[in-house]
Structure formats: structure tokens, C-alpha cells
Image (cartoon, rainbow, N blue to C red):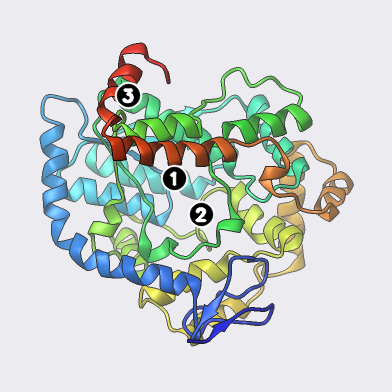
Amino acid sequence: MKITKGKFMKCDICLQTADCDPYFTVEDGVCIYCKEVAPRYAELLQKQPQFQTIISGIKADGVGKKYDCLIGMSGGVDSSFIAHLCGVEGIRPLVVHFDNGWNSELAVSNINNIIESYGFDLETLVVDWEEFSDLQRALIKSSVIDIEMASDHAIYATMMRLAKEHNIGYLLSGANTATESGMPPSWSWRKGDWINLRHIHKLFGSVPLKTFPVYSSFRQFFDRFFKMGPTRVDILDYYPFKKSLAVELLKDKYGWREYGGKHYESTFTAFYQAYILPKKFGVDKRISHLSALIRNGEISRADAEIELSAPIYPNERKMQEDKSYFCKKLGFNESEFDSIMELQPRPHTYYKSDETWFLWLKKVSIFLKKIGLTGIVKRYITQSNKWE
């Protein structure tokens, strides 16, 4: 067994390297992410025959209810394909879309084309722009890497609220092994860390967050541990999901159109991944996205390397146009924004965080399960509404 460490190590299978990834190691030519994902692919072979059983269970739970499940829809490939599966399988979802002010027209078109094909109900959360943009500005000023936390936190909080209001038992998630495996943990942060978001906003924001939807890591933990919220199903892991085939089907059946990058249905995300991450943090998420497709057998390593060698922006003019739009929309002048880009990146734990408490709760949960007190604690929390 040969374990390799160092700045220039690389994997023989995927494109991941040690650049900006302190967790990266290689053993016998195979990186930590390929090794971690391999058992998950073995699990997929066991999960996929259960697809129809899962579908039947979702339908059975929805009997007598208005909706069978809840799905979040951005207009991207994964969420659009889940909506397609609901349509062809006769599932009645409540579709939730988060309008944070950065939707591309293409995203809206893709969403409407699919939900109108099946008559799905759509619930759109439109955030208070003054509050939300102030929180996004604060995250950018703080120099943390995961400035997408604001959007991800709000959409999940909204979905949990709607699940409770409509007594929906299932949440179909777009998370999947095929296109999202092997993302370095240092490239993002836990979306439910409300302590982190709140402290960053306190230091760098100015507009009170009166309407921002909140669903903390603690609430998520207890709801999942005691099974008090909807059951989350990563439905694409129960289906032989191939991104390339999904794209072609969506195009042919619904007139779906591509964005040019994963999660680029949001103009904020597009600029974040194409400019802010590479410039400030040295992170090119295409490496992880392409590596996942290599592992899923959808692209060869050679073709992935060719795709990665292309510049993220086709030309300087396009980059400057996007930068000007981004700064104007968020209220930055470009010199101020450039100065922020030059600041030293800071870990999320530089600010207040729920990390210590969250890790402690995980240990407590293991202990509760071991001594058989899970049911008693669940009844106490349910009766007292402790975590409402």
C-alpha cells in the first residue's frame, strides 16, 4: 500500500488534486474521494431495484392528502428530472421554487414547461430583496467560501414549513451519487449553521433579517434523528440516473434548455463558481463535477481533461459584463468588490458557529440510541414543542 501526500499528487481515476483541498490523499493511485464513493456505487445496485417500491410507498402515504411529496425545483437537470419522474409515475408533488432575485429567464422557462405538462402546483418563495441581498453582501465581505448558504438555508427552511403545513410525508431530494459525489468538504459549509449566518450578518450586514426563513442545524438534527419531519429520499439514487441521458430526455420531451454549467440556472451561482471561487479561493468546481461524471461512466478522463482545459469564461468581455452586473445588483462598486477579492479567505469557524454543539449532539444521539432512550426524548420534544 502506497499513500501519497503533497501538493502535486493526483488520482489515476478522477481529476481531483491536492490544490486547495487539505483532505486530499492518494492510496495506490486512487484518491480518497474515489475510494469513499466506490461503496456507494455498490449500494446503488441494491437500491435501484427498489425504485417502484419507493414510488408505491410515497403514493400510499399520500392517500387522503392533497400532495404525495414535496420537491424543490431550480430548473436545473437534477430537480427537473425528479419532476419528470413524478409526472410519469403519477406522483402528486407540491413543487417549491425559491426566487432569490437571481433567477435566469431560462430557469423559469424550464420550470414552467415541466410543471404545466402535468398540472403540478407550484409554490414560489419570493424573498425580501433588501434583507436577502444584505445577507449575501455580508457573506461576501466575510471572506468565507460558502456564500451560497443564504439561498440553501432559506429554501430548506421553506420546504420544511410547507411539509408541516400540508402534512407531506416525503421530500424528494436531488442529491445523488451520479453527479455530486466526491466534493471536497472544504469547498462548502453546513447549510443549516444559522449561528454562523447570523454572526456574519451581525458583523457585516445592516438590514434586520425579519422575514428570512430559518431552519437551524439543531432543528434539522432533531427532526431527522427523531423522524419528526418528512422522510427525505434521494430518489435519483434509486434510478439508473445518467446526466447525459437525462438532459436529452428533458430537451426532447419538455423543450428544456441547458445553462452551460452545473447550477448555472442562478446567475449568482454562475458568477460565484466561474469567478469568485477560482479567483479568491483557487477552487474550480468543474474538477469535482467532471470527476463525478468520470466515476459514473459518462465521460472519459481524457475528454474531461479537455473540457477542464477550456477557460471558464469564453472571453474577458463576458467576464467583465457579469462582474459589472453582479456588483451593481448587490450594491458594490467594483473597486470595493476587487478589494474584497484580495482579502485572505477565512474559514467559517473564524466566526461563531454551531460546529462544536453539532458534534456534541451527534455524540449524544449515539448514546441515546445505545441506552434506548430515543423514544422517551422524542415524546418530550413533541409534547413540549421544544424545537419549534
SS of the residue under disc 1: loop
Q: Position of residue 69 (x, y in %)?
A: 25, 36
| Furthest residue toward top | 384
SS of the residue under disc 3: helix
Q: Which residue is mark 1?
A: 74
Mark 1–mark 2 distance (CA, rounded to whole Å): 8 Å
The answer to whether the residues at label 3 and label 1 have Cβ atoms under 8 Å apart is no
Q: Amino acid at mark 1?
A: Ser
| Furthest residue toward front | 371
Q: Amino acid at mark 2?
A: His
Q: Earlier along the polypeptide chain: callout 3 or callout 2?
A: 2
**Measured along the vertical axis of the image, is residue 355 above or below residue 17?**
above
The answer to whether the residues at label 1 and label 2 have Cβ atoms under 8 Å apart is yes
Q: Earlier along the polypeptide chain: callout 1 or callout 2?
A: 1
Q: Which residue is mark 2?
A: 263
Q: Which residue is mark 3?
A: 377
SS of the residue under disc 2: loop
Q: Nearer the viewer, residue 65 or 83?
A: 65
Mark 3: few/some/many CA within 10 Å (<14, 14-19, 20+)? few
Mark 1: few/some/many CA within 10 Å (<14, 14-19, 20+)? many
**Residue drawn at point x = 14 percent, y = 33 percent:** 61
The answer to whether the residues at label 3 and label 2 have Cβ atoms under 8 Å apart is no
